[in-house]
Structures are given as C-alpha cells and as structure tokens.
Amino acid sequence: MSRWLALLLSIIGGAIIAYAMLLVIGGAVFGFLWIYVFGDDPWPEWSNYVLGTAILIGGAAAWVYGARVIWNQLQRRFS
C-alpha cells in the first residue's frame, strides 16, 4: 500500500470517527445541559460561544486522535 493512500485513508477515517464521536458526546452534553441546567428557558448568550468553541476544538481533537489510531494500525500492518 502506498504511503499516500494510507495517509488519505487515515484522514478520511479519522474524520468519520470524529463525526461519530462528536454526535454521541455532543448530544449527551447538550442533553444534560438541556435537562438539568438550562431547561426550556432561553439559554444565556455566552453558551453559544462556549459550546461552539468546545465543539470545534473537540471535533478537531477527535479527528486527530482517530486519524492517528488508523495511521498507526496501517503502519504496523504494512511495515
């Protein structure tokens, strides 16, 4: 397998893993905040910025983590 193909597979696979993790973890966090913290009342304005930033940083971190795991597996298998 070409090194560039392995890199492409790890990037795309990492993005898929990150998206799935973001849906599950983000949904759980938003659900907890909705049920136990803020409820049906209007959420504070700062929550949009804080939660949006947390989603971006968490998604990028999950993407790097997922891509790294796949990359390590491919390197071990084909080296």
Image: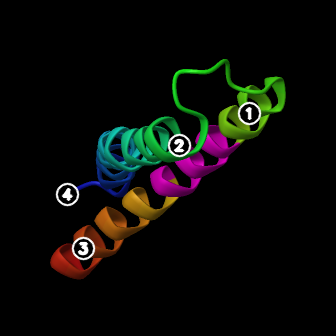
Residue 1 marker: 4
Q: How many marks?
A: 4
61 drawn magenta:
yes
Q: Nearer the viewer, mark 4 or mark 1?
A: 1
Amino acid at circle 3 = Gln
Cα gap from disc 2 to disc 4, whole angstroms: 46 Å
Cα gap from disc 1 to disc 2, whole angstroms: 10 Å
SS state under label 4: loop
Query: Which is nearer the N-term, disc 2 or disc 3?
Result: 2
Cα gap from disc 3 to disc 1, whole angstroms: 38 Å
Give the residue number, with chain letter if any, for mark 3. 73
Residue 33 marker: 2
Say few, some or many: other residues with alpha carbon within 10 Å of mark 4 (under 14 / 14 to 19 / 20 or more). Answer: few
Cα gap from disc 4 to disc 1, whole angstroms: 46 Å
Query: At x 31% / y 48%, what residue is drawn?
Result: 17
Q: Which quadrant of the view contains residue 15?
A: top left
Q: Is residue 71 above or below residue 54?
A: below
Looking at the rendering, in which quadrant would you find the C terminus? bottom left
Task: Mark 1 and mark 2 in contact? Answer it, CB < 8 Å.
Answer: yes
Give the residue number, with chain letter if any, for mark 1. 47
Amino acid at circle 1 = Ser
Task: Mark 3 and mark 1 in contact? Answer it, CB < 8 Å.
Answer: no
Query: Which is nearer the N-term, disc 2 or disc 4?
Result: 4
Amino acid at circle 2 = Leu
Cα gap from disc 4 to disc 3, whole angstroms: 13 Å
